[in-house]
Amino acid sequence: MNRLFYLLALVMFAKIADATAIDTTQIVEIGGIKQYLRINGNDLNKPILLYLHGGPGAAVSAHKDFVTGKLEDHFVVVHWDQRGSGETQRLNTPAIPPTLAQMKKDAEEVMYYLLSHFKRDKLMVLGNSWGTVLGFHLAQKYPRKISAYIALSPVVSNLRSQQATLQILKNHFQLEGNTKAVQQLSEVKIPYDDVKQMLVQYRWETAFGGEEMSEEQFEQLLSFFKGWGKMWMPLYQELYSIDLKETVTAIDCPVYFILGENDYTTYFKLTEEYFGQLKAPSKRLSRIEGVGHNIPAFAATQMQDIVIQNIASEIKQ
């Protein structure tokens, strides 16, 4: 009899635990169009964490188990497929190239929707790469709505970052005597004139990191980037006007930076310099060894461990 009671108690506890979990998708009207949210967490009472994906145009909700699965034990994680990306793109075909102002406004609407829907005063924001542009906007404009802002591989200054990396690459391949690399890099202009120049710099940045790109791979990627550029190059050009060192000198909420120690896409030294100057109530910078720019693809576990160990325990909502 006692054993039966014990088994019934376990079943009831499991049902109660399941009742506090969430695994759902929502289609919400944001910015006048249908936009897609994927929401997951093991406890609805945990803080809300809004994940702002990179790209632009590189939604990761379809890979959320890999990118943020571990975080679901500590947060209610919301993946938003931004305008022109992922499921939101499929809901609004044909997609129209967005502006930076439009994307910022979308991010604001998503934030307010989540606060209202979950009846919260604050949420956390985790931005990756391009997503940090939206994240810095929210954190600077609405610090009382943000319990913490996590900037992953942040875009501090696209212009200064690419200029610095281009010069590093030229110097490196000049010393190596790689005339092909030197010649191709000499034709790159920053801001980029077109997606081919972007890809040329990426090609030799990849080689600098120890991974060669064949001509066949280059041509395949170029075909992809040409398609990407039709949607995103106008917005990407707007990013050259951003320099956080000049425009965002202080943020009135806790700020956390996570960067790869080998990131030359958003040059890690510029990020470290900016972090040192940024004023915030509290801040922390974490580095992931042996990783470049794309942390969600190559160091998702390390990134999540940093968030769980150094941030989750410090944030109360």
Image (cartoon, rainbow, N blue to C red):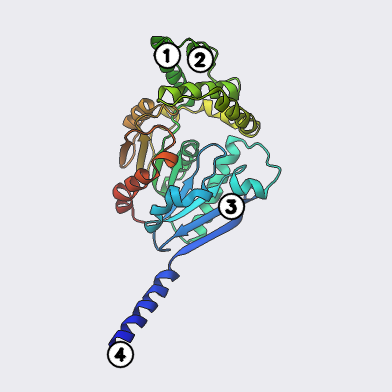
Tell me the CA gap for discs 2 and 3. Answer: 39 Å
Tell me the CA gap for discs 2 and 1. Answer: 9 Å
Q: Comparing marks 2 and 1, which lies closer to the viewer?
A: 1
**Mark 2–mark 1 CB contact (< 8 Å):** yes
- How crowded pointer 4 is (Cα within 10 Å; few <14, some 14-19, many 20+) is rated as few
In the figure, 74 relative to 12: above or below?
above
Tell me the CA gap for discs 4 and 3. Answer: 49 Å
Answer with mark 4 or mark 1, whichever residue precedes in sequence.
4
**Mark 4–mark 2 CB contact (< 8 Å):** no
Q: Where residue 155 sits in the image (x, y, percent)?
A: 45, 32
Tell me the CA gap for discs 4 and 1. Answer: 77 Å
Answer with mark 4 or mark 2, whichever residue precedes in sequence.
4
Under mark 3, the amino acid is: Tyr
In the figure, 181 relative to 252: above or below?
above
Under mark 4, the amino acid is: Met
Under mark 2, the amino acid is: Leu
Q: Comparing marks 4 and 2, which lies closer to the viewer?
A: 4
Q: Which mark is residue 173?
A: 1
Which residue is denoted by mark 4 in the rendering? 1
Under mark 1, the amino acid is: Phe
Q: Where residue 220 sits in the image (x, y, percent)?
A: 60, 29
**Mark 4–mark 3 CB contact (< 8 Å):** no
Which residue is denoted by mark 2 in the rendering? 185
Q: Which mark is residue 36?
A: 3
Q: Is residue 7 visible?
A: yes
